[in-house]
Amino acid sequence: MHNITRRRLLGLMGMAPLAGGILGANGVDATGAANTLADSRAAGGTNMLAESRAARERIHKRYFPDVMLRTQDDKQVRFYDDLVKDKIVTINFFYANCEGICPLVTSNLVKVQKLLGERVGRDIFMYSISLKPEDDTPAVLKDYEKMHEIGPGWKLLTGKPGDIELLRKSLGFTFPNKVIDQDKSQHIGNVRYGNEPLMLWAACPGMAHAKWIAESISWVIRS
Amino acid sequence: MYFNVLGEKVSRARYREMIAAAKTRRELIAAGLTSRRDLLKMGLLTAGGMLVAKSGLSARAYGQTLTPTPPSGGSNDLCVPSQQAASPPTRAFIEPLPIMPSASSVPTLNPFPTLSPNTAAGESRTRDHQLFNRFIQGAKFYNVTQHAIFVSQSPDLPTQAIWGFDDGVHATSPGPTYVNHYGVPILVRNNNALPPVNQNGGFGIPSVTTHLHNGHTPSESDGFPCDFFEIGHFYDQQYPNVLAGFNSDHQPNGDINESMSTLWYHDHRVDFTSQNTYKGLLGFFLLFNQFDTGDETTGFHLPGFVQGFDIPLAFADKVYDPTNGQLAFDLFNLDGILGDKFLVNGKIQPFFKVQPRRYRFRLLDTGPSRFYEFFLTDLNNLGATNQFFVIANDGNLLPVPVQVTSVRIGVAERVEVVIDFSNFAGKSIYLENRLNQINGQGPVIGQECNLPEILAAGQGNLLLRFDVSSKKVKDGSADPTTQTFYSLPDATATPRIIRTFKFDRLNGQWSINGQFMDCNDIRVHIQPNSVEHWILSNGTGNWTHPIHIHEEEHQILTRNRVPPSLPIERSRKDVTQLRPNERVELFFRFRDWTGRYPLHCHNVIHEDHAMMLRWEIDPNGGDNTLVP
């Protein structure tokens, strides 16, 4: 990759139009435009870094309840503090005896995990949250991990049903149609991926090609 | 879910109380409507002195003013209001409408543009320009930089750090308006100088690809979603400004009946388009020719751009965080985002001083997800029917102007209208969106939800106030009833193939024919200069999807097997609304260029969640896949 230097870029930006400029050519008083050159480039006291820190906190409050969950290794973890904060993550929902899309999505994510290699567990963390926490005890999840040959750095999570439901709704894995929303066999198959400290969040279908999912995740890994 | 100003979850009942209290008090005061007479006049006060519960003057979308008790018991998702936070109150109609400046060109570019990507200098283009030498001759150059800008969108909100376009003279959002004529090619150097991602204010990725929407543009300059480039890099986009057919069935200059007038540019970064456009990366791109000259004393005599009577209007609905007034984006929404604040050209509910004569307005729905139906409303005469003329659909002048009382558009669609203010001299009149939409799925269907599809006059979203001066002026523009524009290109040719694209949702995953967007997956190979029919079918029941196809325009042959009934739908299009349970058949003639382009839903939330596919015009192609 070839980076142009900041100095060169500023040089380009500062290149004044010597001819052909058609400012105000449409006859409308350009001062009528509120976003004039002067005030739109000047920060006017706006500190983007400070505002972004505040935005990060608002994202945390709105979307990431710090509920207590349990892993396939029967360890207690807090969703925000232990799993999401300061990390690059993938998040999806599933349940162990799901015969619909879960096996497809899980096997797809196993391929994604292999494609991402040793970064999983080091700076990328994968989370699959059970939609049937009553059935999916840590022991059941451990069996699921073995059956699907899930590698390290990928946590299968269960918890109190109310907490899981709060998590599902907060993370937007919902349908507007209340009947479909409560039908677990139709649950949302998307995989959310994001970089918490950098406030980069997106999602892709869990049934997309594994290579494509891995490529998508790579976009939020930014040095 | 509902939230209070502290971001805490509250019950729906409590939320409604909060909204009702804030709305009736603040908004009425803000609009200067404090006297009993004013309130009565606006239908806000009953004879008994009670405030009428209605959508406020800044008309929010979240259903808080509706009482949806659908007969189906609420299981019909179309009838359930979406659940989002409400913005802080803002006053309406106290600031003027911003007019985007015309983009400034530069004499040359350094380094000079090259046929092949100049990767050594930092260019991120991956493919050669297709007809570089032909269209670099006499080209106009622009050197544009995307960077953070600091704007006031309302005097009642703090300065917003958003992203805009800077042509070296103006740094704005919406960006400077490109104003050009057919026959004059241009080359835009797009530089990425956005702030580092940890300064994104909570959403947006500083990785961009700028699409010229409706451009008959070579693939490598199209702003294809996967052609994104990073901070510190640039991308040269060559826009030949040439009529479709120039390199195929209408050589050498193309078909005049393919003339376009209102295009727009916006970020198209795969998976992040909604965030980046919401953050400001969009603007207008106008094209004129020997008939649509931009001067009302010549050609079609449309209200003149050079005279200042031709005004682009970009509509956007947004949400501001109630705790600090900063622009907020619902990151984890899968359905579609509705805002409760309505911006025109980057300002919340501005006013515009006009003269009592005809104006041409170019209305653009910039999304993310809302549909609009525009009416002219006189708040002092709510019973009046105020007509205007639609002259263009998706930036394509119609065969003849069509007189209407309203016009509906979805995300990315444009409609051009001529409004004659001479009947309103000395008055104020509002551009109002009366379409009832309560969630990201599309406009409500009255029968399904037991809700009005079109709200009563004055009960919708008042978007823009026109203050018409009383001083009589000369009107140099032509009477629309006397005008004719272009003919529709022939759409009777036999298609080489008829393909079907089913737009669906599989376990919440937006899909086309059961598959998902993948930049590396070419789903259709089209023979150059061939005719195809594309059938779009809606597998998602009650959802409405605005479907956009790049490179070539289309004509709607049928909706549910019947030719379109609305005269304005008998036009060239680049976005077609796929309404609940519909099947739409489109005519295409793919010409002049080769390479990769997308087909996608322009509800940008759906688009970002994979309701998109890549197709190619390929000299070695011409596949026979009926269901790609």
Image (tube, helix red, strand yellow):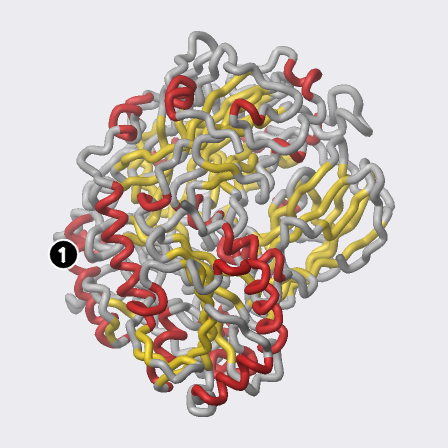
The chain containing the residue under callout 1 comes to: B
**Nearer to me, B350 or A216:** A216
Q: Is residue B116 left or right of residue A220?
A: right
Q: Residues within 10 Å of mark 1 (few under 14, many from 20)?
A: few
Q: Position of residue B560 (x, y in %)?
A: 71, 61
Vertical placement of residue B283 versus B372, above or below: above
For this orientation, the residue located farthest to the front is: A118
Please name the residue that numbered disc 1 is placed on: B36
Instruction: Label 1, secondary structure: give it.
Output: helix
Residue occupying image coordinates x 54% and y 33% = B262
Would residue B300 be seen by someone viewing this image from the given angle?
no
Q: Position of residue B15 (x, y in %)?
A: 24, 70
Vertical placement of residue A54 versus B257, above or below: below
Q: Is residue B600 left or right of residue A66?
A: right
Quadrant housing residue A158:
bottom left
Residue occupying image coordinates x 53% and y 71% = A151
